[in-house]
Each structure stands twice: as structure tokens, then as C-alpha cells.
Image (cartoon, rainbow, N blue to C red):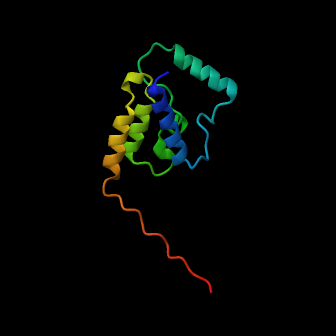
Amino acid sequence: MSTKTDVWSFGVTVWEMLTAAARRPYDWLDDDQLVGALRRWHDAHLPGDPPSPAAAADTAAAAGDCPRELDDLLRQCWSRDDARRPTFADINVFLTVKSAGFCPPPPAPRHQYY
């Protein structure tokens, strides 16, 4: 285990937030199908990436309003080759740059009742 497995989990957590936790990763498979799919993926000697948790939806963007750059980051987090996954330092830089200049909307005024 390494921080690269944590990066995979981070990607899953972000995907779950994008879906408002309304979906579970691999929810389109029953337990036996999931185990079989993961075995096939693990045993595959073909180049390429594994099915991501959002594979059935094709992209994380299908789960909601996900910018293409964030979708690309999530796909990198789920790369089969852990050397191709970003580091948390890379993720931090990405999120810092993407959030630069972000100004959240002001809070709604609170009504006071007397």
C-alpha cells in the first residue's frame, strides 16, 4: 500500500460527493459480478485503465455538473498504473489553481422574528 492507493480512494470520495452520495461505486453490479469484473481486471495483461467507479455512467460528469478538468483528474486518480496517478501535491496544485479567484455567494439574509 502507498499513498497512490489513497489517491484512488480520494477520487472515489470526490465522485461520491459529485453524486451527492446517491450512488455507490459499481452499483450496477451485484456482488458476484463485481468480484468477477475485478478479477478479470486484475488478471488482464492488456494496457489500459481499469473500470473506474463511474464507468457505467462513463464519466464523473454524468453524475452532475463536473468540469472536464475535474473529470480528467478523477480518471488519473483511477489509473491502473499507480505511477500514472497524481500525487497529493499534484492534486493540491490542481485544486488551488482551479479555485483561485473563487468567491462564494454571500449568505442569504437571515430574518429575525420579534
Residue ID at (51%, 47%): 18
35 in relation to 60, above or below: above
Residue ID at (61%, 47%): 22
Q: How many labels sit on residues?
A: 0
Residue ID at (48%, 25%): 50
Q: Image check: 69 left or right of 78?
A: left
Quarter that holds the C terminus: bottom right
Q: Position of residue 26 (x, y in %)?
A: 60, 33
98 in relation to 81, above or below: below
Q: Position of residue 108 (x, y in %)?
A: 49, 72
Residue ID at (69%, 23%): 32
Residue in front for this viewpoint, 71 or 109: 109
Q: Image check: 27 left or right of 15?
A: right
Q: Position of residue 8 (x, y in %)?
A: 48, 31
Taking the view exactly as shown, the residue that stands out farthest to the bottom is 114
Taking the view exactly as shown, the residue that stands out farthest to the front is 114
Q: Position of residue 61 (x, y in %)?
A: 46, 45
Residue in front for this viewpoint, 70 or 34: 70
Which quadrant of the figure has residue 38?
Answer: top right
Which quadrant of the figure has residue 77?
Answer: top left
